Amino acid sequence: MSGTVRIDRVVTSGQFCLDGGCWDVDNNIWLIGDDDEVVIIDAAHEIEPIAEAVGGRKVAAVVLTHAHNDHITVAPALAERFDAPLWLHPDDDVLWQQTHPGVAYTSLADGQRLEIAGTAMEVLHTPGHSPGSVCLYLPGQAVLLSGDTLFQGGPGATGRSYSDFPTIIASIRDRLLTLPGEVRVLTGHGDETTIGAEAPNLQAWIDRGH
């Protein structure tokens, strides 16, 4: 059944705000599923473009790669609209509370497996960009949803509160670059890449320090 899995991309625009500053950003929201059910990865800025991509399908879950405000803007409203559970790694609770204080979510755990459209999606805890950042790996599709941990050209940003460069490097080295080179990396912003395209650049990223 893994061949039936469909991946849809929605791009929305808004602002990322932290540490007293705000920046205009375009965010990728990924929908993983088939013609009947879907998991929504991240919930950025606006509900309607995401709901349009869902169509008439059942939303099995809204899964958040991390809790920076631009990735969770409409998460509670989206979960309520589709009567779906909302999943987040609890190490990002400090960030979650800045945007959605007092709103409950279900805790994600490293190694947890979520089933969607007859295929498995594994949770990889990859701290560094934020304490509770996760990536979602679909081995049957050779796809990694990397959130803001790994991009085309390097690691996610670590210059703001609750982030750490050595930690994100360790996460990428130990959890992501060990995956097969052909794995597609679907990122939280910008264009996709592959593990094989990024792996040779690890030392260069360490040397440049970001």
Image (spheres, grey):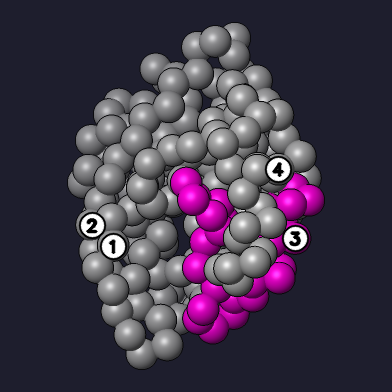
Q: Earlier in the sequence, mark 3 or mark 2?
A: 2
Q: Which residue is mark 4?
A: 177
Q: Give the amino acid at mark 1.
A: Val
Residue stretch rendered in magenta on the structure: 149-175
Mark before the other along the chain sequence, 2 or 1: 2
Image coords of residue 38 (percent x, y):
45, 30
Q: Which residue is mark 3?
A: 170
Secondary structure beneath dot 4 equals loop
**Label 2 vs label 4, nearer the camera:** 4
Q: Secondary structure at mark 2?
A: strand
* Circle on res. 82: none
- Image vertical order of residue 115 relative to residue 43, above or below: above
At a point 28% along the width and 45% down the height, the residue shown is 11
Mark 1 against mark 4, which lies toward the viewer?
A: 4
**Earlier residue among tags 1 and 4:** 1
Determine the secondary structure under disc 3: helix
Contact between marks 2 and 1 (CB within 8 A): the answer is yes
Pair 1/3: label in front = 3
Image-based side of 84 in relation to 56, left or right = right
Residue 6 spot, x, y in % from top left: 44, 21
